[in-house]
Image (cartoon, rainbow, N blue to C red):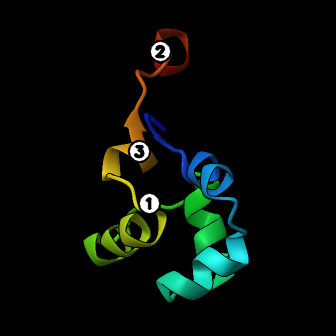
């Protein structure tokens, strides 16, 4: 998927666990894991805003676009 999720990076920078982040954001650790591992098909803006608030970051710190490999697309 061309959208990469960098929640791990921000968790490491903030020295925060997945469980703590999930609790503070108000989502289950399982749902956070789906998002963190790039398996989510969508993310609600309210969830993204809560993640940014708790992690004190911008959406671009959590999500980035990567071009798909031309060989994989063909």
Q: Position of residue 14 (x, y in %)?
A: 61, 58
Relative to 15, 23 lies left or right: left
Residue at horizontal 60 percent and vertical 87 percent from the top? 23
Label whose residue precedes the other's in the sequence (1 or 2): 1
In this rendering, is residue 17 above or below 15?
below
- The one nearer the camera, 14 or 1, is 14
Element type where label 2 sits in the image: loop
Residue 68 placement: quadrant: top left
Residue 45 placement: quadrant: bottom left
Residue at horizontal 40 percent and vertical 37 percent from the top? 64
* Tag of residue 61: 3
Residue at horizontal 68 percent and vertical 66 percent from the top? 16
Label whose residue precedes the other's in the sequence (2 or 3): 3
In this rendering, is residue 47 above or below 9?
below
Q: Where is residue 5 in the image (x, y as percent from the top left)?
A: 51, 47
Mark 1 = which residue?
41
In this rendering, is residue 10 above or below 31?
above
Mark 2 = which residue?
74
Q: Position of residue 31 (x, y in %)?
A: 59, 76
- The one nearer the camera, 60 or 56, is 56
In this rendering, is residue 54 above or below 8?
below
Closer mark to the observer between disc 2 and disc 3: 3
Label whose residue precedes the other's in the sequence (3 or 1): 1
| Label 3 neighbour load within 10 Å: few <14, some 14-19, many 20+ | some
| Label 1 neighbour load within 10 Å: few <14, some 14-19, many 20+ | few
Q: Position of residue 41 (x, y in %)?
A: 44, 60
Marks 3 and 1 sit apart, C-alpha to C-alpha, by 19 Å
Closer mark to the observer between disc 3 and disc 1: 3
- The one nearer the camera, 45 or 20, is 20
Element type where label 1 sits in the image: loop
Q: How many marks?
A: 3
Marks 1 and 2 sit apart, C-alpha to C-alpha, by 22 Å
């Amino acid at each position: 998927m061309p959208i990469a999720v960098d929640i791990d990076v921000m968790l490491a920078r903030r020295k925060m666990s997945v469980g703590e982040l999930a609790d503070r954001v108000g989502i289950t650790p399982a749902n956070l894991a789906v998002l963190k591992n790039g398996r989510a098909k969508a993310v609600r803006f309210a969830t993204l805003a809560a993640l940014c608030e708790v992690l004190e970051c911008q959406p671009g710190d959590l999500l980035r676009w990567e071009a798909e490999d031309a060989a994989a697309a063909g």
